[in-house]
Image (cartoon, rainbow, N blue to C red):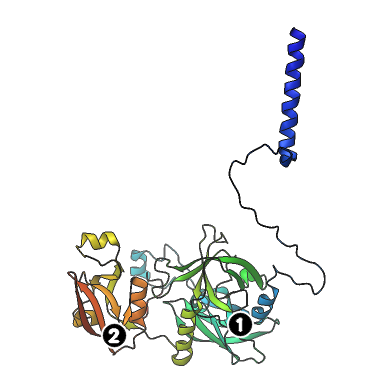
């Protein structure tokens, strides 16, 4: 009897082992096995043909080929004053002043730029060329030519430089505000000065606001690799059209970590045109500090049926807003006929107005809508490093 039980146990063990191996190697042989969860399966992706002249459904070489000649490398030098803790001491400064100040050191600034016209205008980032003394632009064909700054706009971190060269290939601009989450994009630039590179990713967010990085624009967020040196380069769609200017990365190490930001082409184009025409960007100004109106804030202030707009939190004394009758706690819902639903829209609507022009402004005050007339002032340029 003991021998029979031993044979039975061995048979069961072998059978279970065989079933386990089959379930791993050929699970379809076990037709009686039910699925844990129903999964929709699509057809297999078509293989990419390696034959000459064969269609390449997953290649973006045509888009890259179109945009690459329009992207340049920008190298510039700037004089930076070296900081010494001893020399910054107030007592030391009182007795010796700047007598022992260290001489400034020369730093090399590296970035990228995008050719926007055949007559030599190049769009890049403000932080690439701000405060520089010498600018050299290296074209796609390896030719290096000197450049001069046409104008800077620290508020949007955009700048325009110009070169005197022939045979330039300007970029093709994409439709404004056409980027959608999930769109495939290519980031083209010269990271780490290793030479021009093309990286691919998708648009992971649009309308992204990054603290005080830009008070007048929201960013395109992408996971296309953007590294130091890519600043000022092109973000293009799969047709090779410009959709953004690469400007920021989110990183704890200083290198690529999967989140980069680009200035949308619609904003970049407006700023570029003003700089080329006037040498600078002129913006309207109210002299108010505003915040987004959340449903919780509206409820706490007793505002009924008002969930969108920019609530006024501070008013500068003698400002256009004060003279126009805007009060603390007012919710701005329209500027110059344009509806605004948040801070970004409010600031942009104000900035677009020509200084000196009187515009209608609609506000909600104590659940009543009022229409005010405000004479728009001229916005002062934001100081470097001011948040």
Q: Which mark is residue 377?
A: 2
Q: Which of the 4 image quadrants contains residue 235?
A: bottom right
Left or right, residue 336 beside residue 71: left
Vertical arrangement, residue 373 with respect to residue 88, above or below: below
Q: Residues within 10 Å of mark 1 (few under 14, many from 20)?
A: some
Vertical arrangement, residue 203 with respect to residue 337, above or below: above
Q: Earlier in the sequence, mark 1 or mark 2?
A: 1
Q: Which of the 4 image quadrants contains residue 347?
A: bottom left
Q: Which mark is residue 22?
A: none
Which type of secondary structure does the marked residue at label 2 adopt? strand
Q: Position of residue 186 (x, y in %)?
A: 61, 71
Residue depicted at x 27% and y 78%: 287
Q: Which mark is residue 136?
A: 1
Q: Position of residue 2 (x, y in %)?
A: 74, 8
Residue depicted at x 27% and y 74%: 332
Residue depicted at x 33% and y 69%: 94
Q: Quadrant of the C terminus?
A: bottom left
Q: CA distance from mark 1 to mark 2?
A: 38 Å
Left or right, residue 90 beside residue 271: left
Between residues 9 and 373, which one lies in front from this camera angle? 9
Q: Position of residue 243 (x, y in %)?
A: 54, 76
């Amino acid at each position: 009897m003991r021998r029979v039980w031993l044979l039975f146990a061995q048979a069961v063990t072998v059978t279970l082992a065989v079933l386990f191996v089959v379930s791993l190697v050929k699970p379809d042989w076990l037709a009686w096995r039910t699925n844990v969860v129903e999964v929709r399966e699509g057809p297999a992706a078509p293989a990419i043909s390696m034959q000459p002249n064969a269609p390449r459904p997953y290649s973006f070489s045509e888009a890259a080929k179109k945009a690459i000649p329009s992207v340049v490398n920008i190298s510039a030098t700037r004089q930076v004053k070296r900081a010494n803790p001893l020399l910054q001491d107030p007592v030391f400064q009182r007795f010796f002043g700047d007598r022992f100040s260290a001489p400034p050191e020369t730093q090399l600034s590296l970035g990228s730029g995008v050719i926007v016209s055949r007559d030599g205008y190049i769009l890049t980032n403000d932080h690439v060329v701000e405060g520089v003394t010498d600018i050299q632009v290296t074209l796609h064909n390896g030719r290096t030519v000197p450049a001069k700054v046409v104008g800077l706009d620290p508020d949007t971190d955009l700048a325009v430089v110009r070169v005197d060269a022939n045979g330039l290939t300007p970029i093709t601009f994409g439709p404004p505000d056409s980027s959608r989450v999930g769109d495939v994009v290519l980031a083209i630039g010269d990271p780490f000065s290793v030479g021009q590179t093309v990286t691919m990713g998708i648009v992971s967010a649009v309308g992204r606001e990054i603290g005080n990085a830009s008070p007048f624009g929201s960013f395109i967020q992408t996971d296309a690799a953007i590294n130091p040196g890519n600043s000022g380069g092109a973000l293009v769609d799969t047709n090779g059209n410009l959709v953004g200017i690469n400007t920021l990365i989110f990183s704890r190490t200083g290198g690529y970590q999967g989140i980069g930001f680009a200035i949308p082409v619609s904003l970049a184009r407006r700023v570029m045109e003003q700089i080329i025409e006037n040498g600078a960007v002129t913006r309207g100004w109210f002299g108010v500090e505003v915040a987004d109106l959340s449903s919780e804030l509206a409820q706490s202030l007793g505002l009924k049926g008002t969930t969108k707009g920019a609530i006024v939190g501070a008013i500068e004394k003698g400002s256009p807003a004060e003279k126009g009758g805007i009060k603390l706690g007012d919710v701005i819902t329209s500027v110059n006929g344009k509806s605004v639903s948040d801070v970004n829209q409010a600031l942009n609507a104000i900035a677009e107005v020509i200084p000196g022009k009187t515009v209608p402004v609609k506000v909600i005050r104590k659940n009543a809508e009022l229409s005010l007339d405000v004479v728009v002032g001229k916005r002062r340029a934001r100081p470097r490093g001011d948040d």
